[in-house]
Every structure is written in structure tokens, then in C-alpha cells.
């Protein structure tokens, strides 16, 4: 805030956030999943305008401070935008090359319906643990699992919930995960010390989620072999199905094992799938490009593509949107960054978090406030990276002042800011996974048990005080008189 300008009361600072939530609920109820095509972005910009008006007209904040904060926010989203476009390219090329159809085809034969949700969650957890990326996991094996789940008669909400629960568990405890590295850095905690401490809350949360998915899977009445057989017939008729196509995922796994950056892995994976597509699926490439194979290849990467399998449900599963399909999400990211920057530059975020800090009395309220701030930041800024940094920076000194370890802060931040981002419809994670899996955020939200349980588990462990070290901070010595 500008020097000498009055502090914004926290109740006033809540107004833009309240406007955002109210309007988002309204547009999502009115437009459903189509809200991402412009309604959600408009709401974010409107809420940004309300925040600017309050800060500048009501409390004398200068525009340059808000503008600088917005610019800083936008600078941080560059890598995420690049990865989003690459995910679109991978999604299109893996589908049209036959890689995902092959994974679905053989997956239906290997994964039994009575264990499907349990296996889907476990598979995504392992892949995400190895890759360090929930986004990459969802965009590759996640898409294939959606097809298998549909073939076995599971609702898309349950299937997406299992996929996301597993993907975010692996991402959260992987040493290759950027969010894990970021949280440990903000808390000033060595990476593996941070991961070991997270296991106390993360493993029980994941175990409960797995038990729920196992129970539901065992009680599920499969759709019968008819739908699975129809899917298999449709895939075999539309694509050239071959186990050799699984070399593309294997190649991708090797790149990940070499610990290459996610952007490079996704680029090379999309490139490999494109080469395979030209040679293995020449008819599909020619059909997409209307006789021009080079044009078909480029359209697969960047635009919407569809293949007629003779099954309407299957057609929807194999339809892709490429990089162009990510533009709405990118638009949303920029609008969310503008809103978050306005809250920060206008001093409203500081007022809200200061009010939380004043309410802290001990470890229970400290951890609960950290978890609440992580969730609030995800809703207010629309980006998990901003939420991690914001939450960590707000509470870092407070944890030191209260005599608690930095690893408690980094764990509490991950238990909230990392895992709840995918549950917020206008957050970059929520919108991305919704777009990739073709399931509205609010439809899969009730079934993301790991993501829901994690912040609750963090608070429960704080209430129990299990392995929470408290070192009372000595009061500064009083000056002697006389």
C-alpha cells in the first residue's frame, strides 16, 4: 500500500472475494462447464475492478502499486502456460497416434472392474511419484483410465476423483515435484526432511482414500461385458492397436528417469507420438488434414480432432482439443493473476492474513490458520504456486516467533495450498484437470477424497500434537533501571 495510506479493514478486504465467489457460483450454475469459455473470466475481471475501486477510491492506494503486483503475478505463470500448451499437444498426439486407445484397449483386459477405482488411484499415485507432476499424470494415463472407467460403467465423477487423488498424492511426496520443492524452500526446510515429515499426514489421508475407492469398487456392479466389448471393437476398428505403441509411454518414462524438466519431457513425448502417428495411423492423419498429412499432423497438435468409432460415448472420449483447447484456461490464468495481484498490491490480502495471524494462540490455531489461508489463497489468487508462496511468507516469521519448526509450516502449506487447488473451479489446477478429463470441477470434487482429507488430517495431527516440536522462545531481556 502507499506510504501513509490507512490499512484496509479485513471485513472490507473480504468484499472482492465475496463478489467473486457469489458471481462464480451464479455463472457456474447458469453455464456449467461452459463457464470457462468466458463467463468465469469476466467474473474475475469484475471482481478485480471491485478490488481496484476499493483500494484506490476508498483507501488511496496508487495504481502503480497494483499494476506492479499484477505484473509480478503474471511473470510467475509463464512456465505454467507453456506446460499447459504442451499438455494440449501431448493429449492430441497421444490420442491420434493410437497410444491412449491402445492403453485403454489393453487396460480393459488387465484391470478388473471390481478393483478399478482402487487400481486407478494407485496407478496414478505411482506415475505421479515417478514423474513429480500431477498434470502430466492426468494428461497421459489419466485420460486412458477415464476411458476404462467409462467402459466398466463407473461415473466420470468417481473415476476422475480416483485419478486426481492418486496424482496429487504422488505429486505431493515426490522429490521431483515443483510444488514440493517450492513448499520446502519457502519454509526453509531441506527437501527430504520436508517429505519425511509430510508422510505423517499424507500416508493416512491416502490410505483412507484408497479404502474408500476399494470399498466402492468391490460393491460396484459392472456394466457387463457389452460396453467393454463395444469399446474394444470401436477402438480396434478406428485405430491400429499394437503393443508397440506402448513404446511412447516407455520413452516418456525414460525421459522422466533422466530427470529432465517437465516442459522438455512433454515436448519430446509429443514429438515422438507425432512421428509414430504418421507411420502407424496414416489414414487418421490424412483424414484430419483432408488429404494433407502434414496439415493433419499440425492440426492434431494445435486444434480439435475427432475420430468416428461407431460408438457415441467412445467418440467423446477420443475427441481432443489440442493446444487451442487450452486458450480458455490460459485466459483464466491471466484473469486470476490480475485478481490476485490486485488483492496483494491493494493491501487487502495483507489485511486478511493479519487478521488471521492475530487469532493465533497455539499450535492448533496456528496450523488451522495456515490451512485456511492455503485454501483461501487458492480461491482468491486462482493459482497454487502463488498460494504456496503467499501462505509460506505470511506465516514464516509467526512460526519462528511461536517456537515451531519450519517443517510444520511447509507441511501445513502443502496439506492445503497444493492439494485443494484442484478443487477450486476457477483455479488453474481445477480448470486444467476439468478440461483434460472432460469432467466439470464440481462434478469430480466430492470424490477427490485424498484432496479433501489432507487438510483435515493436518488439523487433526495438530490437535493431537503428534511429532510437533515446540521450543518456547525466550522473552527479550528487560532493561535495568538504576
Image (spheres, rainbow, N blue to C red):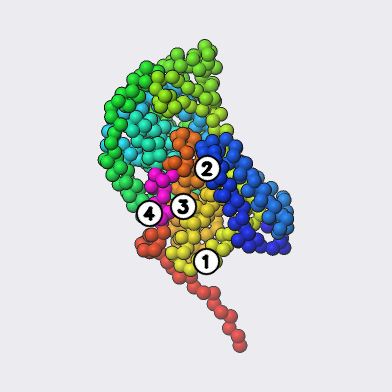
For marks 2 and 3 on the same chain, the one whose residue lies earlier in the sequence: 2
Lateral position of residue 344 relative to residue 445, left or right: right
Whether pointer 4 and pointer 2 mark residues with C-beta atoms closer than 8 Å, the reply is no
User: Which label's residue is closer to the chain start, 3 or 1?
Assistant: 1
x and y, in percent, of residue 475 in the image: 51, 74
User: Is tag 4's residue or tag 2's residue first in the polypeptide sequence?
Assistant: 2
Neighbor class of circle 3 (other Cα within 10 Å; few <14, some 14-19, many 20+) is many
Helix, strand or loop for disc 2: helix
Let me know if residue 446 is in the magenta part.
yes
Does the magenta stretch mainly form a helix, a strand or a loop?
Answer: helix
Residue that carries the numbered disc 1 in the rendered image: 359
According to the image, label 3 marks what residue? 416
Q: Residues within 10 Å of mark 4 (few under 14, many from 20)?
A: many
Instruction: Find numbered disc 4 in the image and state the secondary structure of the residue it sits on.
Output: helix
Judged from this view, the residue extending furthest toward the top is 291
Answer with the quarter of the image where residue 126 lies.
top left
Q: Which residues are magenta?
A: 445-458
**Residue that numbered label 4 is attached to:** 201
Amino acid at each position: 500500500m502507499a506510504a501513509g495510506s490507512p490499512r484496509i479493514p479485513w471485513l472490507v478486504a473480504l468484499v472482492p472475494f465475496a463478489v467473486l465467489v457469489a458471481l462464480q457460483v451464479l455463472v457456474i450454475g447458469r453455464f456449467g462447464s461452459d463457464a470457462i469459455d468466458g463467463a468465469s473470466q469476466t467474473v474475475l475481471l469484475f471482481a478485480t475492478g471491485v478490488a481496484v475501486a476499493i483500494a484506490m477510491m476508498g483507501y488511496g492506494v496508487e495504481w502503480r502499486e497494483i499494476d506492479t503486483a499484477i505484473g509480478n503475478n503474471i511473470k510467475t505463470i509463464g512456465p505454467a502456460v507453456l506446460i499447459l500448451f504442451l499438455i494440449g499437444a501431448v493429449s492430441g498426439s497421444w490420442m491420434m497416434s493410437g497410444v491412449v486407445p491402445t492403453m485403454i484397449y489393453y487396460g480393459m483386459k488387465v484391470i478388473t472392474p471390481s478393483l478399478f477405482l482402487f487400481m486407478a488411484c494407485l496407478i496414478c499415485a505411482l506415475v505421479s511419484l515417478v514423474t513429480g507432476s500431477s498434470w502430466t499424470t492426468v494428461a497421459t494415463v489419466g485420460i486412458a483410465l477415464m476411458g476404462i472407467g467409462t467402459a466398466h460403467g463407473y461415473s466420470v465423477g468417481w473415476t476422475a476423483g480416483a485419478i486426481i487423488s492418486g496424482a496429487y498424492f504422488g505429486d505431493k511426496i515426490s522429490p521431483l515435484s515443483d510444488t514440493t520443492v517450492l513448499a520446502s524452500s519457502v519454509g526453509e526446510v531441506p527437501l527430504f526432511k520436508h517429505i519425511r515429515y509430510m508422510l505423517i499426514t499424507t500416508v493416512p489421508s491416502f490410505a483412507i482414500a484408497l479404502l474408500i475407492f476399494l470399498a466402492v469398487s468391490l460393491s460396484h456392479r459392472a456394466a457387463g461385458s457389452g460396453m467393454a466389448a463395444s469399446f474394444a471393437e470401436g477402438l480396434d476398428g478406428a485405430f491400429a492397436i499394437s503393443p508397440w505403441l506402448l513404446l511412447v509411454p516407455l520413452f516418456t518414462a525414460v525421459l522422466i528417469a533422466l530427470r529432465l524438466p517437465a516442459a522438455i519431457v512433454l515436448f519430446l513425448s509429443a514429438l515422438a507420438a507425432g512421428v509414430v502417428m504418421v507411420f502407424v495411423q496414416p489414414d487418421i492423419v490424412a483424414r484430419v488434414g483432408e488429404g494433407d498429412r502434414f496439415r493433419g499432423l499440425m492440426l492434431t497438435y494445435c486444434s480439435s480432432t475427432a475420430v468416428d468409432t461407431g460408438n457415441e460415448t467412445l467418440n467423446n472420449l477420443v475427441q481432443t482439443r489440442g493446444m487451442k483447447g487450452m486458450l480458455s484456461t490460459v485466459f483464466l490464468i491471466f484473469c486470476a493473476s490480475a485478481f490476485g495481484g490486485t488483492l496483494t498490491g491493494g493491501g487487502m490480502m495483507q489485511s486478511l492474513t493479519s487478521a488471521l495471524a492475530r487469532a493465533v494462540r497455539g499450535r492448533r490455531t496456528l496450523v488451522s490458520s495456515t490451512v485456511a489461508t492455503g485454501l483461501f489463497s487458492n480461491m482468491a489468487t486462482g493459482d497454487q504456486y502463488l498460494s504456496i508462496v503467499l501462505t509460506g511468507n505470511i506465516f514464516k516469521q509467526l512460526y519462528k516467533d511461536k517456537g515451531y519448526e519450519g517443517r510444520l509450516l511447509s507441511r501445513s502449506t502443502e496439506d492445503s495450498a497444493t492439494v485443494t487447488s484442484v478443487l477450486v473451479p476457477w483455479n488453474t489446477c481445477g480448470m486444467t484437470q476439468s478440461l483434460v478429463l472432460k469432467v466439470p470441477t464440481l462434478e469430480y470434487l466430492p470424490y477427490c477424497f485424498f484432496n479433501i482429507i489432507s487438510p483435515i488430517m493436518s488439523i487433526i495431527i495438530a490437535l493431537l500434537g503428534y511429532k510437533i516440536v515446540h521450543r518456547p522462545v525466550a522473552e527479550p531481556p528487560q532493561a535495568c533501571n538504576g
